[in-house]
Image (cartoon, helix red, strand yellow):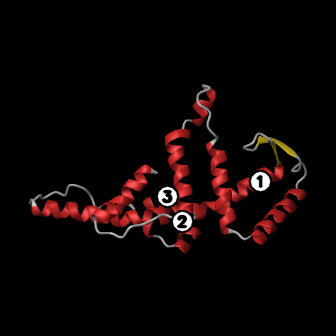
Amino acid sequence: MALYASALSTREKHSLPLYTPEKQAIFVLSFLSNFAVHTRYYNLNTLSDRAKTDSPLDEWADVASDLYKGSVSAGKSESQALKLMQQLDKMPGNTGWTYQLDRTGHPMTVFDVYWRAYKIKAARPLAIWILIQALHPLYAVFDAIGMATHEIDVSTGKQVISIPYLVEFFPFLLADKPTTLRRKRWLSIFE
C-alpha cells in the first residue's frame, strides 16, 4: 500500500491532478499488499509453527464476498443461491456437511463451499476492474516520467534512450469497464 501511495504522490510532481482511490480499491489493494508482505509464505509458516496468520484463501474469499455483495442486489443474490441449492438437490450426496472449515473453524455445508466458490468466481471481473481503476492514474505518471526522461536524453544528445516508454507495458490500464468485465483471459494481450 505504501508503494501505491508513493506512486500516486508523484502525480503532483508532473502537474497531474490528485487522485484518491475508492474504498473498494483500497480494500483490494490492501489485501494484495498484505499478501505480498505477510501471507505469501502462509503454508510454510503453518508447517513450521511460525506466527499464525489467516489463510490468504479465506481472506480472498472475504474480499470477493464483499465485492459480490456490493455489486449484486439482494434479490439477485438470493435468486442465484436458490438456483444453486436446486442444482445441488438434483445431485445425490451433495447435501450435508463437508470436512472444510470456515474462517471461524466451523464445518461448512456442501452449499457453503459451492456458494463461496460461486461468489469468488462472480467477483473476479469486478476485482480486475477495481484494480484497473486504481492503477489507471499511474498510467499518466508513467507517460510523464517517460516523456521527461526522453526530453533529458534529447537535450544531452544521447542516441540511445535511457528507458523505454513505460506506457507500452500497461495498455490494459486504458480498458473501459464493459471490456474489463467481459474479458475472460487477460494474459492473451501480452502474447
Quickly name the residue at label 3: 187
Q: Mark 2 vs mark 3: give the one in front.
A: 2
Q: Which residue is drawn at 45% across and 65% down?
A: 20
Quick one: 56 or 159, which is closer to the camera? 56
At label 1, which amino acid type do we have?
Tyr
Residue 16 to residue 116: above or below: below
Q: Judge the density around disc 3: few (<14), some (14-19), many (≥20) Cα neighbours within 10 Å.
A: few
User: What element does badge 1 sit on?
Assistant: helix
At label 2, which amino acid type do we have?
Trp
Quickly name the residue at label 2: 129
- Is tag 2's residue or tag 3's residue first in the polypeptide sequence? 2
Question: Which quadrant of the figure has residue 91?
Answer: bottom right
Label at residue 59 = none
Q: Which residue is drawn at 50% across and 44% down?
A: 36
> What x and y, as percent, mark residue 6?
37, 54
Q: Judge the density around disc 2: few (<14), some (14-19), many (≥20) Cα neighbours within 10 Å.
A: many
Residue 115 to residue 76: above or below: above
Q: Do the residues labelled 2 and 3 touch (CB within 8 Å)?
A: no
User: What element does badge 3 sit on?
Assistant: helix
Q: Is residue 131 visible?
A: yes
At label 3, which amino acid type do we have?
Leu
